[in-house]
Amino acid sequence: MDKILVTGASGFIGSHTIVELIESGFHVIGIDNFANSSGEVLARIKQITGKNIIFREADIRDKDELMSIFEEHQPDSVIHFAGYKAVGESVEDPLLYYSNNLAGTITLLEVMKEKNVKKIVFSSSCTVYGSPDNVPIDESFPIQPENPYGRTKAVIDRILFDLYQSDNEWSIISLRYFNPIGAHSSAVLGEDPAGIPNNLIPYITQTAVGKLKKLQVFGSDYPTKDGTCVRDYIHVTDLASGHVKAVEKLGILDCEFINLGTGRGCTVLEVINTFQEVNDITVPYEFSDRRAGDAVEVYANPEKAKEILNWKAEKSLHDMLRDAWNFQKKNPNGYRE
């Protein structure tokens, strides 16, 4: 079976994808620099799958280290997750995002080219679409990111397209995902952000478990049914299975950009109310000012993924919020027990 190099192996989506890859029979080589993740994740992947992965602590900007990994392990293809992903932080420190996300990806692609490994699945984002004029969003929508994080993803998508145009031996699938939430059904793996969470679900679960006093809901006056933003939430294991489907299409597809979402939009208040109902727990919250750069309504048209990858999201919002809470309950301090 093929050997897959996974960058950002110990991150939220990377770790869940590795579990799916192992269970689908792939051999995995993982790399991560632990900038915003924990080495504990590797032990937990083994706990679920019963298998160790080959792992090297490395930064994708370190070309010599990457060359060494490719020479020693000779991967057949790459899934590239390694990147910073907080919108607010990207506005405060754009150079960090351009250095890590852009320069790191260019270094990785240079090494892949030199070693003649020309198959890659890239972790892109719906942020490349910015604030679209209408929904649902399909892949033909204009690329108009509104923050440095989204711009790094959009530029990398462009680099990948140009790379394929220059050399048709490349097989490239860029997956633009919407809002990954949830956790592995075992509650062994989940989302464990460092510091105060940037994303809604860990903010809810950390408030529910008592780590945070109150959930902040940013904006109550949006033109939506209850005044709060609408997003497309997708279970992280559904997202992981999308990556396995994509890897299986490498070498068959040329260069494709594909949305991964459910096609359903939920408001922030719907998510909070559903979380309380599913888990029979109260989450104190208060409204605060809108955050700069938050789009009103963002959800996917997932038809291309269904057509090209034979993939669609299976899990409901109930499943996502139950699994997220189970992970937080069993790991009140995340991986830092």
Image (cartoon, rainbow, N blue to C red):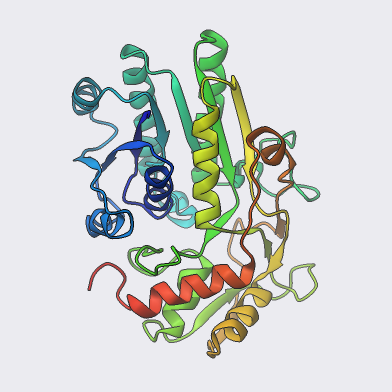
Q: Position of residue 146 (x, y in %)?
A: 60, 46
Q: Quadrant of residue 272?
A: bottom right
Seen from the viewer's position, the closer of residues 226 and 43 is 43
Residue 331 vertical placement versus 173 (above, below): below
Q: Position of residue 41 (x, y in %)?
A: 28, 57
The residue located at (40%, 72%) in the rendering is 327
Asked whether, in this view, residue 71 is left or right of residue 26, the answer is: left
Residue 326 vertical placement versus 121 (above, below): below
Asked whether, in this view, residue 88 is left or right of residue 99, the answer is: right
Asked whether, in this view, residue 241 is left or right of residue 53, the answer is: right
Seen from the viewer's position, the closer of residues 314 and 228 is 314
Q: Position of residue 112 (x, y in %)?
A: 35, 19
Q: Quadrant of residue 96?
A: top left
Image quadrant holding the C terminus, namely bottom left
Q: Is residue 228 visible?
A: yes
The residue located at (53%, 90%) in the rendering is 281
Image quadrant holding the N terminus, namely top left
Q: Position of residue 215 (x, y in %)?
A: 51, 80
Q: Is residue 124 visible?
A: no
Q: Quadrant of residue 31?
A: top left
The residue located at (46%, 76%) in the rendering is 325
Asked whether, in this view, residue 93 is left or right of residue 271, the answer is: left
The residue located at (45%, 54%) in the rendering is 86
Q: How many marks?
A: 0
Seen from the viewer's position, the closer of residues 168 and 225 is 168
